[in-house]
Amino acid sequence: MTTNNLNEQENRRYELVMAGLGGQGVLLATQVLIRAGVGEFAHVSWFPSYATLVRGGDCEGTAILSDEPIHSPLIYKPKSLIIMSMYALDSFVERIAPGCLLILDSSLITTVPDRDDVELVQVPATQQAAELGSSQATNFLMLGVYLSKTNALGMEPMEAELTRTMVQENKENFLPTNLQALRWGYRYQETTSD
């Protein structure tokens, strides 16, 4: 039995694409996820993609955490998608694979794909982040939901890396709200179950 568990652990692989608009913190959130995963996985990959606009343009962060080598940082149909804008959803409709974990910000996305072959999680993320203190924490709230659903990483390495990143970038004033949002997202399923 121990051998089977070790083999399962040796073959862990988590794929996430987080998509939205420039200014929503998509790249920062996926970068923090990857940095937190460095001590937990043998291989990590982060691939940012963004339009030429600084704010408001297409933005996508691809994160892969794996115990096996990663042969390409690109994923066309990821196992998990976090979508933070209606525009991003429209551009990803063809890329949603059967069995995909699809996490949508229901504060901003009012029309959802009519799919019964995905695990759909709708979170009023922007609204909730604003209630916690800043809608700029929406990215980490959504990441908390992802971590809760996949168990890709525990909260301890994520909180440590988020803290390190905020301090390193002289954004300590954002840290309490971001941590609170990450924790709220992680507990979201608990608050919505019967």
Image: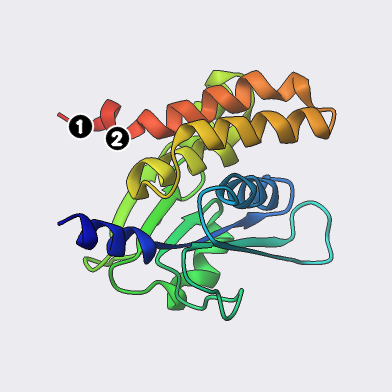
Q: Which quadrant would residue 79 be assigned to in this image?
A: bottom left
Residue at the image position 29 percent from the left and 73 percent from the top: 98
Name the residue tied to disc 1.
193
Question: 186 left or right of 47?
Answer: left
Please say if the residues under marks 2 and 1 sit with CB atoms less than 8 Å apart: yes
- Which quadrant of the figure contains the C terminus? top left
Asked if residue 184 is positioned above or below residue 103 in the image, the reply reads: above
Would residue 112 be visible to someone looking at this image?
Answer: no
Q: Which mark is residue 189?
A: 2
Residue at the image position 42 percent from the left and 50 percent from the top: 152
Q: What amino acid is at disc 2?
A: Gln
Q: Position of residue 76 (x, y in %)?
A: 51, 78
| Secondary structure found at label 1 | loop
Asked if residue 77 is positioned above or below residue 4 in the image, the reply reads: below
Question: 194 left or right of 99?
Answer: left
Q: What amino acid is at disc 1?
A: Ser
Asked if residue 27 is positioned above or below residue 88 in the image, the reply reads: above
Q: Position of residue 106 (x, y in %)?
A: 43, 44
Question: 105 left or right of 32?
Answer: left
Q: Nearer the viewer, residue 17 or 128?
A: 17
Q: How many marks?
A: 2
Q: Nearer the viewer, residue 31 or 17?
A: 31
